[in-house]
Image (cartoon, rainbow, N blue to C red):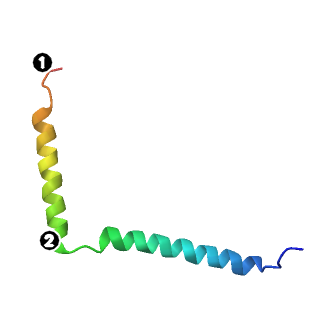
């Protein structure tokens, strides 16, 4: 015979575990120093500029 479990406690435990996973992801995403944020913004800007230089111009206006 299987173990008896309280479904309400199991549901709450699962919710807490999912919340902890989400919190860890948020800490990784938002818990950065100002220098790291500025570096990432500069790299994104360089990449955007590089892509803009590589765009082809069809030569005509619509």
In front of the other: 53 or 17: 17
Location of the C terminus (image quadrant): top left
**Residue hosting label 2:** 35
Between disc 1 and disc 2, the foreground one is 2
Q: Taking 33 as reference, is 46 above or below it?
A: above
Q: Position of residue 21 (x, y in %)?
A: 48, 71
As helix, strand or loop, the secondary structure at mark 1 comes to loop
Q: What residue is at 13 percent from the left and 38 percent from the top?
A: 52
Q: Is residue 14 above or below residue 59?
A: below
* Residue 42 position by quadrant: bottom left
Residue 37 located left or right of residue 10: left
Q: Residue at x 16, y 45 (%)?
A: 48
Name which residue lies at 34% across and 70% down.
28
Residue tagged by mark 1?
60
How packed mark 1 is, by other alpha carbons closer than 10 Å (few <14, some 14-19, many 20 or more), is few
Please say if the residues under marks 1 and 2 sit with CB atoms less than 8 Å apart: no
In terms of sequence position, does the residue under pointer 1 or pointer 2 come before the other?
A: 2
Residue 61: image location, x then y, percent: 13, 21
Given residues 32 and 60, the one toward you in this image is 32
Q: Quadrant of the rendered structure where residue 16 is? A: bottom right
Residue 60 x, y percent position in the rendering = 12, 18
């Amino acid at each position: 015979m299987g173990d008896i479990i309280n479904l309400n406690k199991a549901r709450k435990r699962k919710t807490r575990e999912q919340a902890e996973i989400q919190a860890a992801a948020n800490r990784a995403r938002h818990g950065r120093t100002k220098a790291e944020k500025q570096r990432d913004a500069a790299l994104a800007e360089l990449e955007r500029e590089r892509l803009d230089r590589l765009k082809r111009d069809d030569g005509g206006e619509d």
